[in-house]
Image (tube, grey):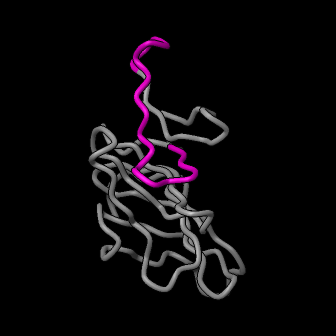
């Protein structure tokens, strides 16, 4: 899992052990996409459209399985890792980066930001709350 710089842009990517196994996961219309980690067989990362802010993303297979995890009201979001059907990362609201968790959809967003923190980020999950 990762990303490749192709045609001047980063494209979320998956490999299966050889250069020839490369699969481009960039969603249709994405100007930048990156895969940062895995949730089992699913890739997690981000995608940006039209130069806009990044949207946390999950891919359960190929490019046609892309789902935005971007919470309503967030200016930007990224998924970094996951486990057990949970995806984790960050979402920014009112200039505050907040640790975030999802379970496969934008509507499943859970704010993990501790009281009193000025910034928080989640990088991985065991799949249990």
In the image, is residue 128 above or below residue 8?
Answer: below
Residue closest to the eye, 9 or 72:
9
Residue 40 visible to the viewer: no
The question of residue 26 being in magenta is answered with yes
Q: Which residue shows up at 50% across the image and 64% down it?
A: 55
Task: Check the picture and name the quadrant holding the C terminus.
Answer: bottom left
Q: Which residue shows up at 58% across the image and 50% down it?
A: 32
Q: Is residue 119 left or right of residue 105?
A: right
Q: Is residue 16 left or right of residue 62?
A: right
Q: Which residues are magenta?
A: 16-35
Q: Is residue 107 left or right of residue 35?
A: left
Residue 53 sits in which quadrant?
A: bottom right
User: Residue 52: x percent and y percent?
Assistant: 60, 68
Q: Which residue shows up at 47% across the image and 78% down it?
A: 111
In the image, is residue 7 above or below residue 80?
Answer: above
In the image, is residue 76 above or below residue 12?
Answer: below
Residue 65 visible to the viewer: yes
The question of residue 33 being in magenta is answered with yes
Residue 48 sits in which quadrant?
A: bottom right
Residue closest to the eye, 12 or 124:
12
User: Residue 96: x percent and y percent?
Assistant: 67, 81
User: Residue 91: x percent and y percent?
Assistant: 55, 72
Total tally of numbered discs in the picture: 0
Q: Which residue shows up at 49% across the image and 86% down it?
A: 73
User: Residue 106: x percent and y percent?
Assistant: 35, 71
Residue closest to the eye, 2 or 115:
2
């Amino acid at each position: 899992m990762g990303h490749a710089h192709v045609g001047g842009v980063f494209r979320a990517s998956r490999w299966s052990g050889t250069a020839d196994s490369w699969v481009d996961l960039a969603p249709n219309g994405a100007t930048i996409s990156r895969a940062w980690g895995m949730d089992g067989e699913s890739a997690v990362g981000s995608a940006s459209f039209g130069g806009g802010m990044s949207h946390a993303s999950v891919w359960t297979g190929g490019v046609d399985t892309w789902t935005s995890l971007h919470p309503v009201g967030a200016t930007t979001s990224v998924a970094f890792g996951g486990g057990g059907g949970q995806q984790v990362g960050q979402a920014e609201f009112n200039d505050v980066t907040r640790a975030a968790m999802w379970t496969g959809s934008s509507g499943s967003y859970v704010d993990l930001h501790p009281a009193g923190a000025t910034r928080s980020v989640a990088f991985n999950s065991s799949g249990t709350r």
